[in-house]
Amino acid sequence: MQKGFYLLVVMLSLLVIGVFRHSNVTEAMVDQSNDRVFLFSLTNALLAGEYGGGTTFGELRQHGDFGLGTTAELNGEVVILDGKFYEITATGKTPQINDSVRAPFAAVKFFSPEQIQALKEPLTFQQLEQRLNTFIPTKNRFYAIKIQGVFSYIKARSSRRQTKPYRPLAEALKDAAIFEFRNIRGTMVGFYTPGYMNVLHSPTYHFHFISDTRQGGGHVLECQLQNVSVAIDSASQLELELPSTQEFYKADLSNPPQPQ
Ligand SMILES: [Zn+2]
């Protein structure tokens, strides 16, 4: 019943976006508002092992200058910051991604924050989330969040390249590379996704990190930070593009195993 309702909400949202798309004037207004999160595929497809890469980073560039995701075959964690696309691979390298590289999942947005907060005190990841909860006006919207400053500790992960037949994400992540950084300047890019959208993007906070020197990063597992600025950009619209691959058509997306 609940799932049916949420699917209905998503379908109605897609319908509304579809209607806008038929009007050039309205579409221009929507783009100008910077009020839309664009999702390529959904978390449940990644969890189910859909790593083939249904879009390109050239396509994703049309939908935002900020975000995160993964590259085809789960080759690395993606950070999108100021219009530049970086891939953090299991070797720890962070090359820029060219437009022809394929992505099986990404969340992007044109970043336009409504509020910037300074956090001076030392905070753990859990404490950071509690502070972010006080900044966001409602838990029922999407937010893009950028956190910049000094991180006294970051524990981050990068998946390792997978080969077919793809294992579910919970299995594939068991041999992910783990990186630890101390006293490092950098940026966490991420999203808040409401709990009721959990099949689309992992709730609630999901961050990827990249150092200022662009020499390290990954999917954030733990952090301790102090003296950072937090920029928050809320979104009331969601555009969801589903992959057009045979693998996606045949995948069972209803209840994939969850990583620990
Ligand atoms: Zn991630």
Image (cartoon, grey):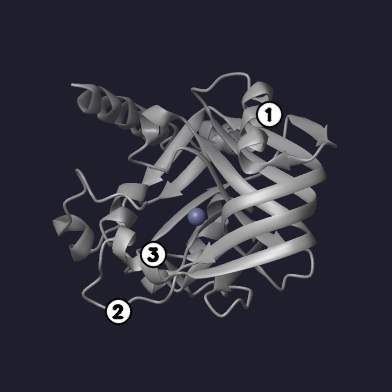
- For mark 3, give the secondary structure: helix
Tag 2 near tag 1, CB within 8 Å:
no
Tell me the quarter of the picture where residue 133 sits: top right
Mark 1 CB in 8 Å range of ligand 1? no
On the question of residue 210 being in view, the answer is yes
Q: Residue at x 68, y 62 (%)?
A: 210
Q: Horizontal and vertical percent for residue 178?
A: 54, 68
- Give amino acid for label 3: Leu
Sequence-earlier tag: 2 or 1:
1
On the question of residue 42 being in view, the answer is no
Q: Horizontal and vertical percent for residue 141?
A: 52, 26
Mark 2, Cα crowd under 10 Å, few <14 / some 14-19 / many 20+, is few
- Give amino acid for label 1: Arg
Q: Residue at x 36, y 49 (%)?
A: 43
Tag 3 near tag 2, CB within 8 Å:
no
Tell me the quarter of the picture where residue 129 sits: top right
Sequence-earlier tag: 3 or 1:
1
Q: Which residue is mark 1?
A: 131
- Give amino acid for label 2: Thr
Figure check: 252 above or below 179:
above
Q: Which residue is mark 3?
A: 173
